[in-house]
Amino acid sequence: MLSVGLVGLPNAGKSTLFNLLTERSVPAENFPFCTIDPHDGIVEVPDERVKKLADFAKAQREVYAAIEFRDIAGLVKNAHAGEGLGNQFLSHIREVDLILMVLRAFKNDDIIHVENRVDPLEDEEILMLELTLSDQKSLETMLPKLEKEVRKDPMGQEKVQVAEKILTALTNLQPARSFETTLEFYDAEVIQWRKSLNLLTDKPILKVANISTGGDNVAFASDFDLDILNETELAGMSADEREELGMPRETGLDKLIRACYSKLNLATYLTVGEIESRAWTFQKGWKAPQCAGVIHTDFEKKFIKAEVVSYTDFMQFGGRKAAGEAGKLRQEGKEYIMQDGDVVEFKIGG
């Protein structure tokens, strides 16, 4: 399961957001470093298609796609050198697939800011600098070992070259991802090795501005704006209750979860029957056999074909059979690239 790490300066709102995401109790008191150890929580990805398919088929249960969220201790300047929780914090980030950077944009004198000001752009710069310097330190430690192993490793020279080029970028305060390794220039083994380094600045980042709806905020070009306090107040209300009050059925939190899912380059295909209506996660661009392997590894090896209908056509025509009669059910082979919202039934050999 792919994971998202919530990071930010102390009191940015990330632990409160984590509580909302996972409905688990973790400390969120108003003082620095209240979160000491990472906490994990599995969060369902909101998808109304699963419920509608379940209602249609009278399925016994609904199973949603999921993402793991991890709450990580607050970061301060010079964490790479051990300040605050330092390397303990940074080591936890290396284990996630996506960094969700929570940046405080709201003004409120009653809530402490560790830098005694509210400036999300500067906060982002602090976070990115610490991640960059940590990667630099990691590669500087690694390079001498790589150079010693050159003669033993057929790809050793290429690995040294890649490490040196990434280190040059980091030294110039550029993220590791600014230097790309592609099959056009590097061996597949080297590319995989580079991924295994788990460099912090190689990871995708989703910037979330914690705002106050209708309040005083600092303008900031974020990827996603969220009023975490307001989301807390809405947390106990059902979609029907929100609709009755003239509010959108979908919360900002639902949208954020899907934004993380999309940022991870994930998509969903669906299966439905009397037992369950289920969302299955796959990487965008995967072909049908790979997607079948998500259900069971043997399915990829024994894949014959996939019977596919889009969710829209499935619901419009009233099921797989009716969609087939309308010419909307397709027989797809091994080269078919699965699409988000495909309702599929795989045919597997013996």
Image: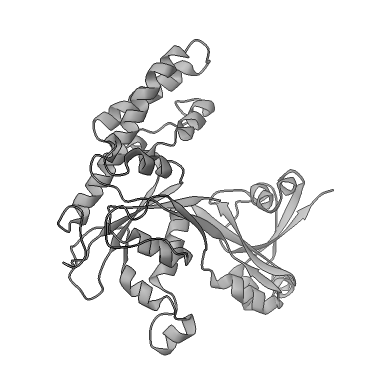
Q: Position of residue 229 (x, y in %)?
A: 31, 71
Q: Is residue 264 visible?
A: no
Above or below for 58 versus 200: below
Q: Position of residue 208 (x, y in %)?
A: 32, 59
Q: Residue at x 39, y 47 (%)?
A: 204
Q: Nearer the viewer, residue 198 or 11?
A: 11
Q: Position of residue 326 (x, y in %)?
A: 69, 73
Image label count: 0
Q: Residue at x 60, y 69 (%)?
A: 311
Q: Residue at x 52, y 64 (%)?
A: 45
Q: Nearer the viewer, residue 267 or 219?
A: 219
Above or below for 249 versus 133: below
Q: Nearer the viewer, residue 324 or 59?
A: 59
Please, which residue is most extreme toward the top here?
151
Please, which residue is most extreme toward the bottom here?
244
**Side of 225 relative to 235 (left or right):** left
Q: Nearer the viewer, residue 170 or 83?
A: 83
